[in-house]
Amino acid sequence: INAAVAHAYSARKIIAVDNNPKRVEFAKKYISPITGKPIIDHVFLNTDLPSSVPQSNGHTNGVSPTDVGAGVGDGEMGVVEEEHHVTPGDIKWEAAKERAAKWIAEAGLTAEEGFDRVIEASGAEDCGLLGVAIAKQGAICTLHVAAPGQTRLTTRFGRGPWTHSDKRIPH
């Protein structure tokens, strides 16, 4: 429906992403009743983002408990920075940025550095991360994150005022 509305308002390029293979196939075949041509320019299947990266040292975050910062323990004086633990969210965010860059290139939007408008309506965490990652700076990105018993967050950010609504969904 979002693609049809964007098409009706003369969007220059429409890109669709879904995490359901059947909906991706439907979107690829969706034809405008007015023009008889496909409405959606590119359709991508989103798969789960990785939440851990196995490292050669056997630690998922790439940092061994015996690793020390540069200069420490070799006779140099210096300030030891706080240790940063790589979280599953950090790993997912990096994977989302890599996937977004690939899709931006495939859609021919490398010069634009992303999308002007993003609507994320699946509610899936990984799709929300990709929605933010694929939006260019100054874009308007609307995220609908909802699950029974969880918080629904609708966010719109860009050059204008940042707004959000936070509502509890009944079980």
Image (cartoon, grey):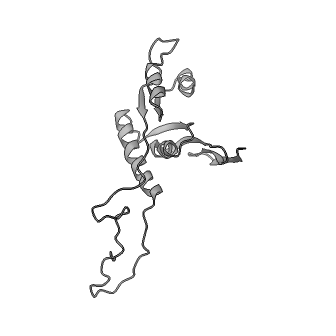
- Residue 12 appears anywhere in the view: no
Left or right: residue 102 versus residue 128 is left
Residue at the right extreme of this rendering: 170
- Residue 27 appears anywhere in the view: yes
Image spot of residue 170 (x, y percent)? 72, 44
Question: Residue at 53% of width from left, 22% of height from top?
Answer: 7
Question: Residue at 51% of width from left, 26% of height from top?
Answer: 11
On screen, 120 above or below 36?
A: below
Image spot of residue 80 (x, y percent)? 39, 80
If the image is split into quadrants, where does the C terminus sit? Answer: top right
Left or right: residue 3 versus residue 79 is right
Left or right: residue 110 versus residue 124 is left
* Total labels drawn: 0
Comparing 136 with 69, the one in front is 69
Image spot of residue 158 (x, y percent)? 56, 45
If the image is split into quadrants, where does the N terminus sit? Answer: top right
Question: Residue at 56% of width from left, 21% of height from top?
Answer: 8
When asked about the image quadrant of residue 53, the answer is bottom left
Question: Residue at 70% of width from left, 44% of height from top?
Answer: 169
